[in-house]
Image (cartoon, rainbow, N blue to C red):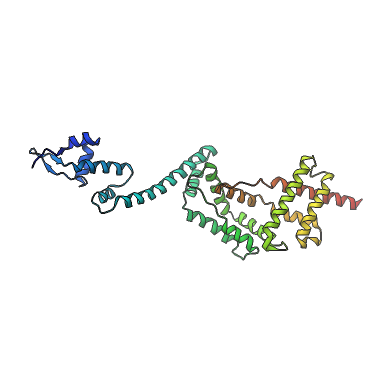
């Protein structure tokens, strides 16, 4: 055999930049078989070994396993097919790494304990289907005894959290808090109470628009009052409390019976549940939506003003 166009392992190592040990390993695995041997018995390789080793090196650097590399070299699988499949696998790995990075940054920012970090990591690395299942299970549990407000129930089912492929630490933290909230029996009861309360609207199919309009008006009027120095526990707040109360009484026809203020206080106690509002805030954070300002200060002002108005009214009647 002519050895003019054959290379020793040492020559291949110099030409490819691979180590002699690596080339011998690939040769032993049959990935780069020798073309012959020297008179002294050393392995010799043909020119095609240079091309094979270059491809092996590239594919290995891209993360392909040896079995797949061999399939490509032996033409058992086409390079485009392998590249496409491996790119898909890398997409999954990249997303996983990004989520892990966000978890670590969230841990660093929040001063999380090891137990909390473990929970955060397990929840953050759930698949999209697992994430949806967790929330869907919560919604079904809320309405297991029937749906007093189908529109509200449908909204809960269709608006799901979607953690992006490259989440921020805030989104990871929001998702973990939301997932924990969904597991809370107390929160599930609160959501059902809110759904039942909203079902009392005169037109349940438009309950969402009705509540949005009432909340918007209440926020605007109370923010105006606060800006002008009207305190809810003072007599100057009574007229606004009565105006807002009348709006609610008009919207909810059943509220016209009996003590309107007492009905409103009971209703605000349900509607202003901080856990329910927190759920929607967390959902907005996870999905990257603009978050609406909290209504907690508005509800607090209105509740205090109503109680004050009731007290003023009781004092007037007693006098």
Q: Along the horizontal axis of the image, is 54 left or right of 40?
A: right
User: Which residue, as the protein is rendered here, is positioned at the far right?
Assistant: 319
Residue 231, placed above or below residue 310: above
- Left or right of residue 155, residue 265 in this image: right
Residue under the image location 57 percent in, 59 percent down: 157
Q: Quadrant of residue 224?
A: top right
Q: Residue furthest bottom?
A: 146
How far across and how far down the image is residue 52, in percent? 23, 44
Q: Is residue 313 left or right of residue 220?
A: right
Image coordinates for residue 195, horizontal then vertical, percent: 66, 59
Viewer-side residue, 263 vs 26: 26
Give the vertical position of 90 relative to 129 (above or below).
above
Residue sitting at 48 percent across and 40 percent down? Answer: 104
Counting every numbered tag in the picture gives: 0
Residue under the image location 76 percent in, 54 percent down? 265
Task: Provide residue 83's location: percent of width, then percent of height.
Answer: 34, 49
- Hey, which quadrant is residue 231 in on the image? top right
Viewer-proximal residue, 301 or 308?
301
Counting from the top left corner in percent of width and height, residue 163 is at: 51, 49
Q: Residue at x 11, y 41 (%)?
A: 37
């Amino acid at each position: 055999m002519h050895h003019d166009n054959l290379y020793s392992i040492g020559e291949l190592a110099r030409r490819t930049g691979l180590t002699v040990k690596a080339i011998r390993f690939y040769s032993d695995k049959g990935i780069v078989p020798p073309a012959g041997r020297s008179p002294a018995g050393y392995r010799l390789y043909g020119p095609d070994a240079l091309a094979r080793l270059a491809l092996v090196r590239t594919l290995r650097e891209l993360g392909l396993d040896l079995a797949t590399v061999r399939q490509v070299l032996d033409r058992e699988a086409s390079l485009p097919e392998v590249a496409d499949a491996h790119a898909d696998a890398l997409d999954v790995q990249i997303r996983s790494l990004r989520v892990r990075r966000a978890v670590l940054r969230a841990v660093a920012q929040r001063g999380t304990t090891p137990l909390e970090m473990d929970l955060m990591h397990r929840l953050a690395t759930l698949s999209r289907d697992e994430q949806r299942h967790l929330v869907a299970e919560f919604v079904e549990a809320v309405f297991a005894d029937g749906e007093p407000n189908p529109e509200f129930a449908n909204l809960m089912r269709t608006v799901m959290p979607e953690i992006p492929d490259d989440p921020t630490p805030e989104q990871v933290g929001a998702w973990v808090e939301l997932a924990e909230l969904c597991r809370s029996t107390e929160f599930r009861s609160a959501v059902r109470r809110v759904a039942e309360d909203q079902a009392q609207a005169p037109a349940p199919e438009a309950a969402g628009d009705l509540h949005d309009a009432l909340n918007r008006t209440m926020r605007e009027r109370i923010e105006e009052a606060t800006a002008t120095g009207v305190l809810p526990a003072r007599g100057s707040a009574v007229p606004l409390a009565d105006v807002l109360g009348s709006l609610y009484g008009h919207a909810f026809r059943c509220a016209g019976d009996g003590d309107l203020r007492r009905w409103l206080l009971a209703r605000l106690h349900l509607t202003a549940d901080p856990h329910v509002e927190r759920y929607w805030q967390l959902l907005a954070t996870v999905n990257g939506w603009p978050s609406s300002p909290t209504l907690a200060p508005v509800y607090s002002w209105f509740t205090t003003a109503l109680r004050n108005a009731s007290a003023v009214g009781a004092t007037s009647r007693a006098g």
